[in-house]
Image (tube, grey):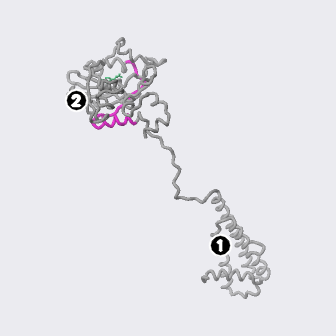
Amino acid sequence: MSPKAFKMFDIIQETHHRFDQLQLTSERRSDLAKGLVALAEQEAKKLNSLEAIEAYRVEWLGSKGIHRRIRDNWLRLAPVEDKKWIGPLLVDLEFRIKQNIERAKSFNEVLDIGPPLDVSLPGIERALGTRHVIRQTFEELQRIFLSIGFSVVEGPEIETPYYNFEALNIPEHHPARDNMDTFYIEGTRSPHLLRTHTSPMQIRTMEKQQPPVRIIVPGKVYRRDNPDSTHGYMFHQIEGLAVDTDITFCDFKGTVEYFVRAFFGPKVKTRLRPSFFPFTEPSAEVDASCHVCGGSGCRICKHSGWIELFGAGMVNPAVYGFVNYDPERLSGFAFGMGVDRFAMMKYGISELPVLFQNDVRFLRQFP
Ligand code: DAH
């Protein structure tokens, strides 16, 4: 037994003795008082179960406990001047012990709620979403164009016919409007429609900005198409526009070829086919050699070896007239591609609707 523990033992022994037999020096008195309080506090720290708490209560406050023995053996028999310190000691002791019991009980109740807390267990994993495959494709396309000096601008999905058609050199009764016959919005003072392509942002950008212009425009577009496995009333496009004082058809072709290789792979070849868009002259369809069969012909490319990618061309000088650009001094090229189609080609998705049904079994395949 350590000297300290011995002292405690001593104190408890002494509570068995009648006070008049103790013959206490004043030093011994204060030792006893302090030692009892310290012992009660020290034992309380070890109360880690409801059984231990009950044992503690019995030991200190029970009918044969220390508190009762001091009261019966000491207080009752002590001379008046000793009652003056024994009385307060008992009050203090009882107060502290009850407090210790309460504290230990509430602490143990908290611990009793469940199994002991193991802080080394892994936490609860929350399911994190992923970026939609369309968003991923947008980002991939943007990364390529940002790397060659284009910047991204966005525009309104609700447009005026002026920006959607007229300023793009598509006058009111031009047949090019036919395949864009579309969603007009009722109840607005001037006519508005859901944009049918991202091309209006060519005009809005050139109205605001002097050349050089090098922008791409990602966004949603709307058409009155009958939904089937490759059509919907809404789809996604990226428009591109580059205008400066010395842009040639070679710049156009070089940019298109660079882009196609960066997106579909270094082996893919590019081909330009004559086409028509009112806002480009000359216009072209950009085709790529089939990324599935490599050009030898398969089901995907309908045995032609080529896949149609997007429309493009040199900006029609007529368009510059709408934005006060000088057609004698400036030239440029433009393109507009369907992002959904690109995503379908790149990831081998055969049905457009699955892109918008938000079935997690589909979405999870594109982490
Ligand atoms: N706006 C056209 C469409 O949605 C696509 C397009 C073709 C955009 C040629 C262009 C372009 O900028 O030069 O069908």
Query: Does the image show residue 316?
Result: no
Give the labeled residue for mark 2: 251
Q: In this view, does 229 lie to the left or right of 335?
A: right
Q: Is mark 1 on a helix, strand or loop?
A: helix
Q: Give the amino acid type for the residue marked by disc 2 in the picture.
A: Asp
Q: Where is residue 208 in the image (x, y as percent from the top left)?
A: 32, 27
**Residue that appears at 23% across and 21% down:** 327
Q: What element carries label 2?
A: helix
Q: In this view, does 129 lie to the left or right of 104?
A: left
Q: In this view, does 41 lie above or below 206?
A: below
Give the labeled residue for mark 1: 43
Q: Is residue 275 left or right of residue 156?
A: left
Q: Give the amino acid type for the residue marked by disc 1 in the picture.
A: Glu
Q: Is residue 122 above or below residue 16?
A: above
Q: Is residue 151 left or right of residue 357?
A: left
Q: Where is residue 37 in the image (x, y as percent from the top left)?
A: 66, 75
Q: Where is residue 250 in the image (x, y as percent from the top left)?
A: 20, 28
Residue 160 part of the magenta segment = yes
Which quadrant would the C terminus be assigned to in this image?
A: top left
Badge 1: how crowded within 10 Å, few (<14), some, or many (20+)? some
